[in-house]
Image (cartoon, rainbow, N blue to C red):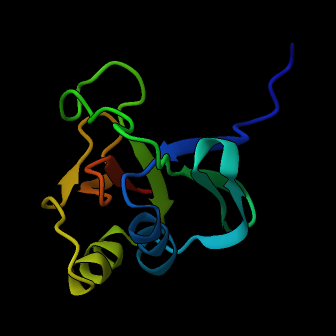
Amino acid sequence: MQILGVHHVAVIASDYEASKAFYTDVVGFTLEAEYFRAERDSWMGKLALNGTYILELFSFGAKPGPPARPSNPEALGLRHLAFAVSDVDAAHAELRARGVDCEELRTDPNTLKKMFFFRDPDDLPLEIYEA
């Protein structure tokens, strides 16, 4: 098997509209397609970033819904999603100006690249990392 790359990352949101707005208006994804799956009472949005990576955003309307993340960020499974930017300082300032709570800037001790963490509406850890 020869893996060609990452096709998509899937995120389950507690409030689909709030998360869709966050990922499009704040993070900069574009909504490529959106589907309602009646059998699951669930929305699925396909979000693109620079035409390269796809984030699939899901909601599930049936109660009780998906369980909350068990711990932050050290739960088993996906630890966080990182986005590469050319100017970490500018990204940090822009997110803060939009009202997003961001951790302080720091430097990766292994690569000496700038980075910081912030969270989506469901507390999923997201990272901005110097390209």
- Quarter occupied by the N terminus: top right
Would residue 70 appear left or right of 66 to someone viewing this image?
A: left
Residue depicted at x 16% and y 68%: 101
Residue depicted at x 30% and y 33%: 110
Residue depicted at x 52% and y 74%: 24
**Front-lying residue, 72 or 42:** 42
Say if 14 sits above or below 91 in the image.
Answer: above
Whether residue 131 is visible: no
Q: How far from the left and from the top, in percent, is residue 103?
A: 15, 59
Q: How far from the left and from the top, in percent, is residue 39?
A: 68, 42
**Front-lying residue, 122 or 76:** 122
Q: How far from the left and from the top, in percent, is residue 32?
A: 74, 69
Total labels: the figure holds: 0
Say if 27 sits above or below 115 in the image.
Answer: below
Q: Say which quarter of the image contains residue 116.
A: bottom left
Residue sticking out furthest to the top: 1
Q: How far from the left and from the top, in percent, is residue 67?
A: 31, 32
Residue sticking out furthest to the right: 1
Whether residue 53 is visible: yes
**Front-lying residue, 76 or 131:** 76
Residue sticking out furthest to the bottom: 97
**Front-lying residue, 15 or 115:** 15
